[in-house]
Image (cartoon, rainbow, N blue to C red):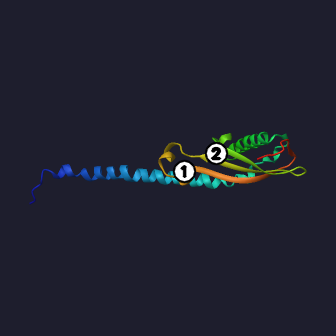
Amino acid sequence: MRARTPSLPRERGAAAVEAALVVSVLLVPLFLGIITYGDYFFRAQRVDTLAPGVPVGGVAGEFTCQGLKDTVAATVVDVVADLDASLAGIDVSDVTVTVVEVLPDVGVTVDIHIETSLTSGLASLIPLPGGGAIVTDFSQRLQDVTITDVMCA
């Protein structure tokens, strides 16, 4: 017959404790990082589909150069929040509007640049591409728009 060693029952739970430590220290952060990266790339992919859906062509009238930029940026923020709920937190400061071409009889062509950051919560702890910013660029031709400024930069 075998003699039982008194330390055997104490060592049974050691493997479970070691496994719990490995899972909590190594695997949980890895799993959360994978989820964060997936969320970032999902949002970045959806932003590129926003450009055709932003109807800034509804902007019409006579504007100063800065007034046109502000109006287009406000319109983009309103429309983007309705098109994609995940980008509902963008601000007018996240939208940059550049007047590219002013044609008196045709209208104005503007470039619109949207850059919003995802560095909140867990995303701030993980090095995401571009610092975690989601970026999209597109151009729009605004008809029935005239600019009162001589030069518009």
SS for dot 1: helix
Residue ID at (17%, 53%): 8
Please state the horizontal and vertical placement of residue 152, each as a whole percent of the image.
79, 46
Please state the horizontal and vertical placement of residue 55, each as a whole percent of the image.
78, 48
Q: CA distance from mark 1 to mark 2?
A: 17 Å
43 vs 148, left or right, is left
Residue ID at (54%, 50%): 131
Mark 2 neighbour density, 10 Å: few (under 14) some (14–19) many (20 or more): some
Residue furthest to the front: 150
Q: Are marks 1 and 2 in contact (CB under 8 Å)?
A: no
Residue furthest to the bottom: 1
Q: Nearer the viewer, mark 1 or mark 2?
A: 1
Disc 1: which residue:
131
SS for dot 2: helix
Name the residue nearer the viewer: 76 or 5: 76
Indicate which disc, 1 or 2, sits on the residue closer to the N terminus.
2
Residue ID at (29%, 52%): 18
Amino acid tagged 1: Gly
Q: Quadrant of the N terminus?
A: bottom left
Amino acid tagged 2: Leu
Mark 1 neighbour density, 10 Å: few (under 14) some (14–19) many (20 or more): few
Please state the horizontal and vertical placement of residue 62, each as a whole percent of the image.
86, 40
What mark, if any, has residue 35 been given in the picture? none
How many numbered discs, if any? 2
Name the residue nearer the viewer: 55 or 1: 55
Please state the horizontal and vertical placement of residue 75, each as a whole percent of the image.
75, 42
83 vs 109, left or right, is left
Disc 2: which residue:
87
Name the residue nearer the viewer: 55 or 133: 133
